[in-house]
């Protein structure tokens, strides 16, 4: 139903063209012909909460008296929305997603607005559900409290691009490449891709990598599909969906589940291999060997690796091994950085399996950068990985670090990984190191995608503040020279399938080599030095895709 043009409210500000834009802070009566366009900002919302909001939106529309109240329409572009539903409660965080000038023209509400609207049977007043404190005031109060609210923001270097993914990308869901499609964190077909992910993981655990990749590509395509799939005809012409995968989709459409998934998840072998591979140092190949010699559980692994039963992170000291020479003298470690052995990983498994909320990710980032600034002032950083793609909970924390000096930063950053890691170990913030490397020449033959950047993969714990129980976390630090900073940020932001197709696109469509280390032309090795994340996309001839739309995995 088309939306009718609304009259501007008296308190509207002039936009750039001098036209008036209405404020959408509070409820105003709408005609029956109106639509309220709703955008669900997924950041900080759990997957189940996002799914529930989609359902509530449909429920409200189904029960509305269309003669009295406007319908709600889900929109995919944030600027087009009248109402933005979000769990964000701070202006600073909201501005990562939408300019404050534009936010003041919208109704920015908490999820409770939709829940109460469903309960009441119609859209209720926005004002009492305002998510951001500054938007609870009247316009005059807001301008009095923050007269510079719409003024320009300082431009710090480096600054990530905050442009919104275009309609053209949103409509490009049938593209062959994941790096040209928009893939939200939670998609309309999330239940289906979750089922297919079980099949993908099963193939990975059994060493069937080609089959696993096929399922991964299918999942990436379905993550970008904008509507709930109710017929196999809808997906007939989509790429990467072979006959076997199409049959699984058909089964899911008719039965709501896939029988093979139920058989896999119920099998002792799948459960054992899945459990074994949660331990650092145990990949699918080792997991299969452990299963073949009779191990079936993590308790069996404890006995196999001589770890005391039921040990946890509070008993790590008992696992520290001292090696002695034949004459009884202790052997000194070559490195003072304790390595993460399988024994220690078993003791830490509960801590490392606990997901990390966004607030703790930010606290870890702040703590690391405080130590780094004391060691080497002038460094800059970006938290990447799932956090940057909008996940409310992360499995680990990845931070890309560089220096703001464009001319000398490359030399400054060399060796900084080992220095910073040693400092964090000395202060008790890093307890174990899984891998640490310096800069080295990239693999010229590209036989592996493990980039040549300096990295420190560690186990980290925040200092005790007397308020929270601190637990051990995975922390990866990646160091890039200033000219490779933005390729490193993109390369480590993910998702895996997005990155895989980004490399494939660069090679097949543009004759370029792309990885976290940099961007070069294949035929003459010309090096490109992008000045921003968006410029990387421009060099590759790609439309911009916001990090929160790069979730081309389950």
Image: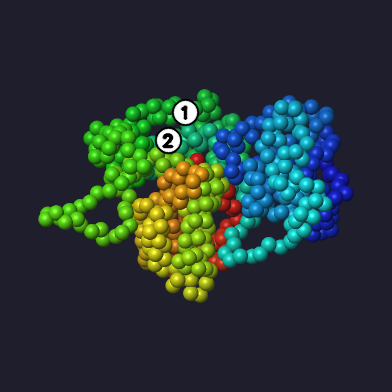
Residue 548: give x, y in percent of width and height. Answer: 58, 49
Label 2 vs label 1: CA separation? Answer: 10 Å
Residue extending farthest left: 327
Residue sitting nearer the eye, 30 or 198: 30
Which quadrant of the figure has residue 327? bottom left
- In the shown orientation, is residue 254 left or right of residue 342? right
Residue sitting nearer the eye, 529 or 273: 273
Residue 245: give x, y in percent of width and height. Answer: 47, 35
Residue sitting nearer the eye, 425 or 10: 425
Residues packed near mark 1 inside 10 Å, few (<14), some (14 to 19) or many (20 plus): many
Circle count: 2
Q: Residue 308 bears which disc, if any?
A: none
Q: Are marks 2 and 1 in contact (CB under 8 Å)?
A: yes
Instruction: Give me the residue at 71% from left, 46% from top.
Output: 133
Against 275, residue 371 (above or below) is below
Q: Which secondary structure lies at badge 1?
A: loop
Residues packed near mark 2 inside 10 Å, few (<14), some (14 to 19) or many (20 plus): many
Q: Residue 258 bears which disc, if any?
A: 1
Q: Is residue 32 visible?
A: yes
Q: Is residue 36 visible?
A: no
Residue 159: give x, y in percent of width and height. Answer: 59, 62
Instruction: Give me the residue at 44% from left, 62% from top.
Output: 479
Mark 2 vs 1, N-terminal side = 2
Q: Which secondary structure lies at badge 2?
A: helix
Q: Which residue is mark 2?
A: 199
């Amino acid at each position: 139903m088309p939306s009718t043009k609304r009259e501007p409210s008296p308190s509207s500000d002039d936009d750039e063209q001098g036209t008036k834009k209405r404020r959408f802070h509070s409820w105003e009566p709408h005609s029956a012909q109106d639509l309220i366009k709703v955008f669900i900002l997924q950041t900080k919302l759990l997957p189940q909460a996002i799914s529930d909001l989609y359902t509530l939106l449909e429920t409200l529309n189904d029960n509305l008296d269309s003669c009295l109240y406007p319908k709600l329409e889900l929109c995919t572009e944030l600027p087009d929305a009248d109402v933005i539903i979000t769990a964000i409660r701070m202006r600073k965080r909201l501005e990562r997603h939408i300019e404050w000038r534009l936010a003041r023209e919208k109704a920015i509400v908490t999820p409770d607005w939709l829940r109460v609207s469903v309960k009441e049977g119609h859209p209720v007043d926005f004002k009492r559900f305002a998510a951001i404190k500054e938007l609870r005031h009247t316009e005059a109060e807001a301008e009095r409290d923050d007269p510079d609210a719409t003024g320009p923001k300082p431009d710090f270097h480096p600054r990530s691009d905050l442009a919104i993914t275009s309609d053209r990308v949103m409509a490009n869901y049938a593209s062959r490449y994941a790096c040209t499609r928009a893939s939200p964190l939670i998609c309309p077909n999330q239940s289906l891709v979750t089922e297919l992910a079980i099949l993908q993981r099963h193939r990975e655990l059994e060493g069937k990598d080609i089959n696993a990749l096929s399922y991964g590509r299918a999942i990436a395509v379905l993550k970008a599909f904008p509507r709930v799939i109710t017929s196999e005809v809808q997906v007939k012409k989509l790429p990467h969906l072979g006959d076997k995968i199409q049959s699984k989709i058909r089964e899911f459409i008719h039965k709501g589940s896939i029988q093979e998934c139920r058989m896999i998840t119920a099998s002792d072998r799948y459960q054992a291999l899945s459990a074994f591979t949660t331990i650092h140092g145990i990949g699918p190949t080792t997991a299969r060997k452990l299963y073949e010699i009779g191990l079936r559980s993590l308790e069996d692994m404890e006995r196999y690796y001589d770890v005391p039963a039921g040990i946890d992170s509070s008993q790590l000291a008992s696992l520290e091994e001292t090696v002695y020479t034949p004459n009884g003298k202790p052997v000194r470690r070559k490195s003072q950085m304790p390595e993460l052995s399988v024994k220690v990983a078993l003791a830490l498994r509960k801590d490392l399996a606990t997901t990390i909320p966004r607030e703790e990710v930010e606290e870890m980032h702040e703590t690391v950068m405080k130590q780094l600034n004391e060691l080497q002032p002038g460094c800059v950083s970006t938290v990447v990985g799932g956090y940057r793609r909008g996940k409310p909970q992360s499995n680990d924390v990845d931070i890309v670090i560089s220096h703001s000096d464009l001319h000398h930063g490359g030399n400054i950053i060399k060796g900084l990984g080992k220095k910073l890691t040693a400092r964090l170990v000395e202060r008790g913030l890093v307890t174990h190191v899984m891998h640490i490397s310096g800069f080295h020449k990239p693999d010229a033959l590209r036989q592996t995608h493990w980039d040549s950047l300096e990295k420190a993969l560690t186990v980290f714990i925040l200092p005790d503040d007397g308020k929270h129980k601190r637990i051990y976390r995975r922390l990866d630090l990646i160091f890039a020279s200033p000219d490779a900073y933005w390729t490193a940020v993109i390369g480590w932001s993910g998702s895996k399938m997005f990155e895989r197709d980004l490399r494939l696109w660069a090679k097949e469509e543009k004759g370029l080599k792309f990885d976290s280390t940099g961007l070069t032309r294949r035929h003459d090795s010309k090096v490109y030095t992008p000045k921003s994340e968006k410029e990387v996309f421009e060099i590759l001839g790609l439309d911009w895709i916001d990090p929160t739309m790069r979730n081309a995995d389950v």
